[in-house]
Amino acid sequence: MRIAVIDGQGGGIGKHLTERLRRELPENIEFLALGTNALATSVMLRAGANEGATGENAVLYNALRVDIIVGPISILFPNAMLGELTPKMAEAIASSPARKVLLPLSRSGIDIVGLKAEPLPHLIEELVKKVKDIIA
């Protein structure tokens, strides 16, 4: 089972997801850090990802080769993360056959109605539970 953690900018969300999933899931799960920039990839690697790759082609190539994709919901939005997430990246992620388990963070000027605002640690807890259910 391979899980891609996708993040950009400073990689903080990806770092927290990688650390928490690494702690909670079996050791045989492989984590792939896919950063929109080298800093984000590096931060996720230090948090425990097995491998890491950076940039548009890394996302395009690996989106088809993982079982689960986790990250902020903005990874589905072209030009999100101040333009770091390209339209091709968003399309590859959305079109991937992998299950997507995403955090509903609204930093891209998109508000998702019907979701209760929760602190990041609570959202990460829910994401971890969902991933556990998927791999069970």
Image (cartoon, grey):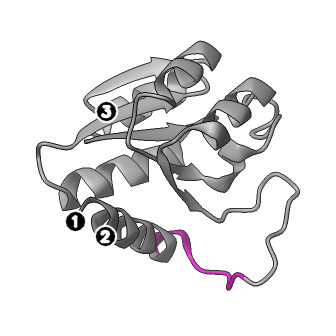
Q: Of helix, strand and loop, which mostly describes the magenta segment?
A: loop
Q: Label 1, on which residue?
A: 136
Mark 2–mark 1 contact, CB under 8 Å?
A: yes
Placement of 108 over or under 96, stated as above or below? below
- Number of residue marks: 3
Q: Label 3, on which residue?
A: 46
Is 4 displayed left or right of 107 in the figure?
A: left
- Identify the mark nearer the N-term, 2 or 3: 3
Q: Secondary structure at mark 3?
A: helix
Which residue does the image show at 58% across and 62% down from the upper left?
Answer: 103
Depth order, front residue of 65/102: 65
The residue most toward the top is 57
User: The magenta stretch spans which residues?
Assistant: 115-121
Q: Label 2, on which residue?
A: 133
Depth order, front residue of 98/125: 98
Label 2: how many residues lie within 10 Å, few (<14), some (14-19) or many (20+)? few
Which kind of residue does numbered mark 3 sit on? Arg
Is residue 120 on the magenta stretch?
A: yes
Depth check, mark 1 against mark 3: the one in front is: 1
Label 3: how many residues lie within 10 Å, few (<14), some (14-19) or many (20+)? few
Which kind of residue does numbered mark 1 sit on? Ala
